[in-house]
Amino acid sequence: MERAVALLKVGRIMRLLILYQFKYGLALRSSSMMEWVKFCSQRCYLQMSKKAVMMQLLENDDPTTLSYWLDWRVFLCAVWVLVPMVVASLLIWKYEHSGNSKSGAGGSRQESSHVHSDKSWKPCLKEIHPIFLMCFRIVAFCLLLVALSFDLALHGAELFYYYTQWTFTLVTIYFGLGSLLSMYGCFHNLKINSNGKCYLTEDMEQGLCVPLTHGVNGNGVRLSKRLDNPGTLRALITSSFWEDMLQVLFQMTAGAVTLTDIVYWCVIFPFMALKDYEMSFLTVVTHSLNAVMLLGDTAMNSLEFPWFRISYFILLTGIYVIFQWIVHACVSIWWPYPFLNLSAQLAPMWYLVVALMHVPCYAIFLMVVKVKHWLLLRWFPHSYRYSP
């Protein structure tokens, strides 16, 4: 097919030369004619060869074709993504499931529920009123929601191709859920203090599990008979689910925010500054406001930060990468991050580097939480509520 096209082009050139001869009355020698024909045919063949090579390269770089996904780089990148996700799932099943089974061990504990923890809405210092934490979360949620709305209005839904936008949205959801739990906790605490039917001791303030029985339990805590109401029990169980969800969102977004902001300000921004890139206000807000609000909430909240919950952070990134693979397998569009392109020569190395970066990013925020616990326990030993 390519040779036929080349011959057609040579024929067209020969006809043009004949017309040129008749028009200007120039007598072309046969040797000159043959040299022109040879030169033009070689040039056409080279052009067709270059086009064939380019078409082959485009076909190999097209993620909608089967040959793109049968490359060895894709297999190696899939290993770097799927193996950490499997390990993370096993860690979640081991620690979360073992924690639930231990809390449910024993006949009396299986039959009874427990009073929900107050770590989701009480600050870590007794001097800080829970309403202050609630107001901070409401203000943070409003600021993040406004920034997210403006960004979507200007750039559309294509923003969700970026991992940064996933992280920013999850931080917004975290502060929205945290605001609701803070309002619920403040209202519940005010209601208990106003009716005077439940006397709380220091043990309950520390979030210990208390069986819901009549009268006085083993810890000397007198509970209200209203807690035996099935509707109240369902409310407590439901609130416990949302508190666990808040805990997971906190640890998931902490690692993701650290990863996105460090990569942007330390890797992407220096190259953009060298090219005189004009940075918009929303770009700065997207890569800074979420971290500032999350650090402010971390300084006041009482949420835990165990190591094994890095698994949720790993699962978030893995789901994002698989989402990108599915989208590009269906539609041939641009990659939001160049290192996600599986056809690149260094794609396996980039995937491995990004996977390994999850550990130091999560460790940085874990260190922040540890320093917070150490400082507050040293400066406010009598008013600090929770130990690390």
Image (spheres, rainbow, N blue to C red):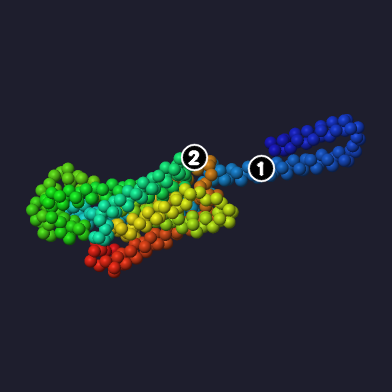
Which of the labelled discs sits on residue 353, or is there none?
none
Is 71 drawn above or below residue 373 in the view shown? above
Quadrant location of residue 60? top right
Is 347 drawn above or below residue 49 in the view shown? below
Residue depicted at 21% across the width and 52% down the height = 116
Is 204 drawn above or below residue 68 in the view shown? below
Front position in the image: 238 or 343: 238
Please state the horizontal and vertical placement of residue 198, each as a whole percent of the image.
Answer: 13, 52
Front position in the image: 25 or 194: 194
Please state the horizontal and vertical placement of residue 47, each as a whole percent of the image.
Answer: 72, 42
Q: CA distance from mark 1 to mark 2?
A: 25 Å
What crowding class fits label 1: few (fewer than 14 Cα within 10 Å), some (14-19), or many (20 or more)?
few
Residue on which the image places disc 1 = 52
Please state the horizontal and vertical placement of residue 174, each as a whole percent of the image.
Answer: 34, 49
Q: Secondary structure at mark 1?
A: helix
Residue depicted at 91% across the width and 32% down the height = 25
Front position in the image: 174 or 66: 174
Which corner quadrant holds the C terminus?
A: bottom left
Front position in the image: 194 or 305: 194
Question: What amino acid is found at the position of numbered circle 1 in the picture?
Answer: Ala
Quadrant location of residue 48? top right
User: From where the camera sits, is residue 171 visible?
Assistant: yes
User: From where the camera sits, is residue 314 visible?
Assistant: no
Which corner quadrant holds the N terminus?
A: top right
Residue depicted at 25% across the width and 54% down the height = 130
Quadrant location of residue 260? bottom left
Mark closer to the observer (1, 2): 2
Left or right: residue 255 versus residue 202 is: right
Residue on which the image places disc 2 = 330
Question: What amino acid is found at the position of numbered circle 2 in the picture?
Answer: Cys
Left or right: residue 208 versus residue 24 is: left
Is 232 drawn above or below residue 222 in the view shown? above
